[in-house]
Structures are given as structure tokens and as C-alpha cells.
Image (cartoon, helix red, strand yellow):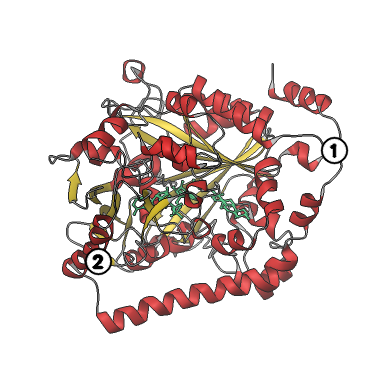
Amino acid sequence: MSSAESTTMAQRKREKRPASFADFIVQFRWIVVVPVVLPLSFMFYQYKAWQLTIHRFLHGPSNDETHAEAIKKVQKRIRERKAATDGLICTARPPWLGVALRNSEHKRSTRFEVELGHLSTIVWIDKEKKLMKVEPMVCMSQVSHATLKLGLAPAVLPELDDLTVGGVINGYGIEGSSHIYGLFAETCTAFEIVLGDGTLVRCTADNEHSDLFKAIPWSHGSLGLLVGVEFRLIPVKEYMRVTYTPVHGDLKKIAQVYTDLFCPRDLDQDNPEKVPDFVEGIVYSEKTAVITTGRYASYAEAHNKGNKINALGWWFKPWFHIHCEKALETGEFVEYVPIRQYYHRHTRSLYWEGGLIVPFGNHPLFRLFLGWLMPPKVSILKYTQNDAIRKYYIQRHACQDLLVPQHKVAESLEFCHDAFETYPVWLCPHRLFKMECGTMLDAEKGYAKNKKPGDTDYAQMWTDVGVWGVPGPVLREEVWDGVEATKSMEKWLRDNNSYQCLYAVVEQTEEEFWKMFDPTLYTAMRRKYGAEGAFMPLYYKISNTKKTPQATKKEKNL
Ligand SMILES: NC(=O)C1=CN([C@@H]2O[C@H](COP(=O)(O)OP(=O)(O)OC[C@H]3O[C@@H](n4cnc5c(N)ncnc54)[C@H](OP(=O)(O)O)[C@@H]3O)[C@@H](O)[C@H]2O)C=CC1
Ligand SMILES: C=C(/C=C/[C@@H](C)[C@H]1CC[C@H]2C3=CC=C4C[C@@H](O)CC[C@]4(C)[C@H]3CC[C@]12C)C(C)C
């Protein structure tokens, strides 16, 4: 059945549903956001910047010694824990401060909180070795600020200023360069972990703790507390040469054009001539998409006569996804974007979620006079949202990412059209390196015997399909159930050897969860490194269910 036919079916089945109080509150949320949340967000960013400058002025730059002292505080706190009476360990970060959308019920149950807020400095940058060491609460804006002025950048720099290094490693972090380097955690060379008994271990891909090193990504702090990270940097140029390629056709055609733009059919995937530095797809409807590909470019190249430079990061410029959409009318075009502005292209509009929060946010007059206040800080949005808004985002809104093998992109788009009918959809490719040691995520078994475009012997190409926004039926005021849609997506993912991203709301049961993710290495590492009975287990942390005293007790006995 074609996606067009299935839409019509879905539309016919759905009954009308009158707008509720929650719809009303969400529609007029801007009344609080514009005069309150935006100025508060702005002040918060200024405060943070000054705090860092003053800290540096008073204490000088951080180094391995100051870092070691900071770790001791974490070890001391963990050693104070009485296993028999205290709750299980988690970080002391309040849920509203984090970027994740899920409920963080575990932070409302009995728990033993460990403060990591003081671990928020850059320890060093080694320009020669192209390595950087940071503490886990360092956020992405600090990383890009410190590295770009040296002509370097993390190989993968997840977008959104407030994401923390600890968060994108223990969860996941992706960017348009992930088709070359993998997810953020895969660009890391060492993790420092404080275990349940307060011991500090340094693990790397090939030392005696390499098993723990491989198990940390996606573990959400359930194996130990991450207190230091070393990761790779790459040299970057001043500009990104961006090509905007429009696609008109069905979802299969969109998936094909997208794949062809970065996966050479002759499988010559490691040839930089054939593979761009950056890739991203924005699917605007089941018939239209724009794929952007980027290549680093020097100042001299960008300023060659005839080249178009677009400093699209200025506050008065149109939001990036709206700008890209123009290619559907004008046809393919090329322009040069200053590199930092390219890295932060979706930040001002929170991808396209900003449009639901400030509906006139892309209006030229708003941009001109107040655009510099954007975006609202996710944490302040979370802090000021009431229960009706929180439930709306679970029941009447889509915010999920599906990680699917590249050869399943077309099918996943068709599925998403049927289940969510939410546009735009984000496409971001990423490599999954072949692990074969029971990591939670891995390339499909045996994929290398039948390699498809994008695959190499050591990694399979995957794509993050990001479905964020208001579903078609909700826009048409029809019945649509976000919980049911999420459950059907989770089933589809399990049936298709694919994965759900865990910053979002998870509805599947624990049993189903461990069918989606491989528990082998994770479970072994919990046992080997003494995390059982010390750190909250993963499913307990990410699931949406209320943490009753009974549930906590059961988890403690694990
Ligand atoms: N471009 C991208 O890749 C984007 C990614 N995201 C998502 O946002 C999430 C990150 O948000 P952020 O606010 O930074 O992180 P969070 O505070 O939400 O942390 C994410 C998880 O990691 C655990 N964690 C965080 N730091 C540590 C640490 N130092 N040691 C042990 N465990 C830790 C937390 O444990 P605890 O619960 O105990 O606090 C939590 O379970 C990512 O995981 C990603 O899924 C969102 C937008 C964009
Ligand atoms: C997964 C990616 C990006 C996802 C973003 C689009 C979402 C990540 C967290 C989301 C949000 C968190 C909390 C919110 C508070 C609510 O009151 C309003 C919505 C929101 C701001 C919500 C909006 C979408 C996110 C920012 C990748 C991999 C790029």
C-alpha cells in the first residue's frame, strides 16, 4: 500500500475531537514565554558566561591537578553512602535542568544524589594531538567556543548549547558529521569513572577496562559516574559550503536521493571526494524534502568572486529549516555559511519545536526586534511548564527519534507517516561501528556479508529519523493518542532491529526494552564493576513509570 493511500485510510478512521484546555494553553504559551521565559533565558546565559569568566579569573584555568581535586569530592560523597539504608545513586542534577523530554521519575523516588555540578570546566586542549579533556558538566557551547577559535572542533558536535558532555555520552549525541565519525561517544578516547565503592577507573578502548569503556554509552549513569572525558578534535575551516538539494517524489524517492548524496553506490565510503563532511535531511511532507550536504571551505574559497555568503546565524535571519525549504521552489543552490553559525543552525528555533512555543517567532518583525532573545532555554521551559503542558507533550505531540539501518529509511518514513504524520522529519545519518561484544547497540548481524551503500567492513550506515512536532490528526482536531503511537513505534523498532532514542518518553515494558537493546555487556559490567545495588538500573531511570517504594525495593535487590 502506498503512503498516500495509508494516509487517506488513517484520516477516514479518525473521529473529530474538540480542542481541549491543554491545546489552548499550548497555543497561547507564548504569552508567558515571550515576556518571561525569553528574558530569563537571556539573563541565565549572561550569568553563566560571567560565572565562567570570574571562575577563571579567580582560580586560573583548570588542569589535571584541579580536576583530580574535583573528583575527590565525588569519591568522598559516594563513600559516605550506607548501602543498607541509603537509596541508589544518581546525579543530583534536577530533571528540569536537563535537555531530555522524559519525565525522570527516578529523581522523585528514594535516591542517593551525587553532585557533579562543580565538574564543569575544560581541563586541557592538546592542539598537537588534537585531543580535548573536559569535565562532564561542560556543555556544547563551552566546547565549541573553546575549540573553534583554534581552528578545531569535536569530530561530532551535537547541536543545542545546553547539552552536557556527560549527557551525550551516557545518552547519545549526534550531528551531521556522524556518518563519518559515529555518535559523540565514539569520538571519545578515555572515560574516567567513579564506581559504586568510590574507586576511580580510567578506561580506554584498549586498556584493562576496555569492557567498561564500551559499555558506558547509553548506560545513563547506571554503571558509574563519569567524571572526566577525553575526545578527538578535527581541524576545521572558516566556512561550510552548503548545497541544498530539493526532492519531489514519494518517501521512497526521498530516502533514495538522501542515501545517494553520501553513500557512493560503489561502496567507496572512505573516499572524501565522494562523501561530504556534513549531511542532513529535512522531510517537509510525504512528497517533499531538502537534503543539505556540507563541505568545509576556507575563507579564501568562500570569498571567491561570485560565491554567495550567508551569515544565517544572525538573529534577524530566517530560521534554518525555513530557509532550506526555499530550495523546493528555487531548485538546488549553494552558499557559504560561517562555520560556528552552521554548527548552531537549528539552535535559535530548537529545530522546528520553537514554532510551537513562539508561533510568530520566524516573522521578520519578531526576528528583527526580539530574535536575539531566542531560543528559550529548554530548562526554563521545563521549569515553567504545568502538568497540562507536560501531558500535552506526551499525548498530543510527537517527540521521538528512531535509529534505523540505512536500508530501512524508506520503510521507517512510511511507518512514521502512518503513525505520526508529523512534519518536518529530521534525517541524520550515523555510523554504527561493528562491536560484536554485546554492546547495547550494534550493527546488524552479518551485514558485512551483504554490504549496502554506506556500509564498510567495520561499520554499518544508520540514520536517526527525528519526528518532532504536532501530528497531522492533532492539527486537524482528530483523535490521536501519543502513547499508542509511541508504543506502535517501539514495536516497529523491535521488529526491525532498530533502536529508540532514550531522551524521549519510553512506553515499552522492561522485557520489551531488553529485546530492543542487547543487555549482554551491560549486565556483565553491572556485575563486574559493582554497580548492582549501588547505581539505579537503566530501565528504572529511563522508563516513565512512577517509582513506588516497592519498585525501588525490587530494583535495589538487583
Ligand atoms: N544533538 C543531539 O544529539 C541531541 C541529544 N539530545 C538528548 O539529550 C540528552 C542529553 O541531555 P543533558 O541535559 O546533557 O543530559 P541529562 O542530564 O539529561 O543526562 C542524560 C542521562 O545521562 C546521565 N548522566 C549525565 N551525566 C552523567 C555523568 N557525568 N555520569 C553519569 N551519568 C550521567 C543522567 O543520569 P541521572 O539521571 O542520574 O542524572 C541521565 O540519565 C542526550 O542523552 C540526548 O539523548 C537532545 C537534543 C539534541
Ligand atoms: C534528538 C534530537 C533533538 C531533539 C529536540 C528536538 C528535542 C530534545 C528535547 C526536546 C524538548 C525538551 C523539553 C521541552 C519542554 C517543553 O515544555 C516544550 C518542548 C521542549 C522544548 C522539547 C522540544 C524538542 C526537544 C528540544 C537530536 C538528535 C537532534
Q: Give the SS element for disc 1.
A: loop
Q: Which residue is mark 2?
A: 70
Q: Is residue 278 above or below residue 151?
A: above
Q: Is residue 212 above or below residue 323?
A: above
Seen from this angle, which residue lies furthest front? 85
**Can you give x and y, in whole percent of width and height, for residue 32 in the image?**
71, 67
Which residue is at a point 37% across and 31% down the rendered structure image?
Answer: 441
The circle on residue 17 is: 1
Q: Earlier in the sequence, mark 2 or mark 1?
A: 1
Give the CA separation, mark 2 to mark 1.
55 Å
Q: Give the SS element for disc 2.
A: helix
**Can you give x and y, in whole percent of width and height, for residue 66 in the image?**
20, 70
Density class for disc 1 (Cα within 10 Å; few <14, some 14-19, many ≥20) is few
Density class for disc 2 (Cα within 10 Å; few <14, some 14-19, many ≥20) is some
Which residue is at a point 47% across and 54% down the rendered structure image?
Answer: 159
**Which three-letter amino acid code belongs to the residue tagged 2?**
Ala
**Can you give x and y, in whole percent of width and height, for residue 39 in the image?**
62, 75
Which residue is at a point 27% across and 55% down the rendered structure image?
Answer: 78
- Residue 371 can be seen in this image: no
User: Quadrant location of residue 129?
Assistant: bottom left
**Which three-letter amino acid code belongs to the residue tagged 1?**
Arg
